[in-house]
Amino acid sequence: MFALTQTPIDYHALTESVRSSKSGAVVLFLGTVREMTEGRRTVALEYEGYPQMAEAKLAELESRARSRWPIDQVAIIHRLGHLELGEISVAIAVSCPHRKQAFEAGQFLIDELKVSVPIWKKENWDDGTTEWVHPS
Amino acid sequence: MFALTQTPIDYHALTESVRSSKSGAVVLFLGTVREMTEGRRTVALEYEGYPQMAEAKLAELESRARSRWPIDQVAIIHRLGHLELGEISVAIAVSCPHRKQAFEAGQFLIDELKVSVPIWKKENWDDGTTEWVHPS
Amino acid sequence: MLHVKFFAKARDVVGSSVSEIPWSDGQSVLQLKQALTEKHPGLQPMISRLLIAVNNDYAADDAAIRTGDEVACFPPVSGG
Amino acid sequence: MLHVKFFAKARDVVGSSVSEIPWSDGQSVLQLKQALTEKHPGLQPMISRLLIAVNNDYAADDAAIRTGDEVACFPPVSGG
């Protein structure tokens, strides 16, 4: 399950959607809006996406993850629009038979999402300026 | 926060307890009762704990993790008693500034919990037999 | 004509989320980048970092584009 | 007397969650294991794998135990 949403992410529902008795391990990753970045203070973030390509790249990401780990179920949701401090920008839930697989798959999914899925983030700094984020 | 509980684990409350705007990443691990183990079918598990020592070892585990990663907040809860297939036996939530730290700390905490915290698991196999699990 | 979508800073710079570019079937991604900077000079300083997606996948400079293709232009992604 | 708690398979084998062992301050964990197998012969087959915890921490065979200590005997843990 992949989704882009303008409303707060219900990670509880997302996590429930990947649970099953075939799996002994579930890993959930939440990306949240952090206040401090290299000494600068954020007051909010804006996320913009290219929905039809994002969906295609997320499906490709799932295939790549499934070719490497025995994933039972996976669900990914990314928030778009205006996010306040502490809000959840992305949630990834994955279930596998064993825990090491679930941790590795979860980390792979967020690492790769950040380089391949067409979504962009704009910082709103506390000095009133805004700035599109360049990936590091 | 550490807890042993006889009732179903509320991992949503656990996860909320570690969220903060100091952190950009939250990792939640859930251990769940898996049906198949090396070709044998489980119908239920029983968990037994030694509560006062478990609390001491969990506190020690948190200190060890904090000495290795810049952990913001961590919360661990382990279920005791009778668990049906698919139920959650353990939940670990950890927040860190960055995602790699949160994944590494989460994996360390469950790996070490399984070797140091005095809790034992008894399999109820589908042939009616029960068996205390030997750690692998 | 090629219908090109813009996202993030590319959209801000162009001042629109879409642009129509005169096109002949089979011209390359590199030729599209040249046409885009001619029509929208504000893109010039960032053109070397801009990505072109064709039919929902990243396209290399030598890939050919047809007029019916779904085409987008945007900076490196920064979601998550 | 030393008050020893049992958990998991050790408790099942002993048939009780606690046992009173005659004790002199300063005797070792190894001596406790010997005393436990004498009083509870069912523990003999598993004694090499059993762990002794003293005051909520794992204790090596040569550690000394005092009569007021919190002492427990159990198999390797298998939680999670």
Image: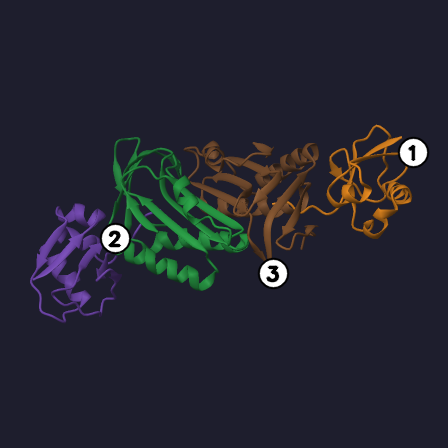
Chain colours: A brown, B green, C orange, D purple
Where is the C terminus of chain A found, in terms of image quarters? bottom right
Q: Residues within 10 Å of mark 2 (few under 14, many from 20)?
A: many
Pair 2/3: label in front: 3
Depth check, front residue: D21 or D45: D21
Three-letter amino acid code of the residue under disc 2: Pro
Is B45 placed left or right of C36 in the picture?
left
| Spatial separation of the CA atoms under disc 2 and disc 3 | 48 Å
Q: In this figure, which residue is indicated by the disc labeled 1? A: C22
Dots 1, 3 in contact, CB < 8 A: no
Q: Residues within 10 Å of mark 3 (few under 14, many from 20)?
A: few
x, y percentage for residue B70?
Answer: 48, 60
Pair 1/3: label in front: 3
Q: Secondary structure at mark 2?
A: loop
- In the image as oriented, which residue stretches furthest toward the front? A128
Residue A64, quarter of the rendered image: top right
Q: In this figure, which residue is indicated by the disc labeled 2? A: D75
Q: Chain of mark 1?
A: C
Depth check, front residue: C26 or D50: C26
Three-letter amino acid code of the residue under disc 1: Pro
Q: Is residue B134 visible?
A: no
Q: Secondary structure at mark 1?
A: loop
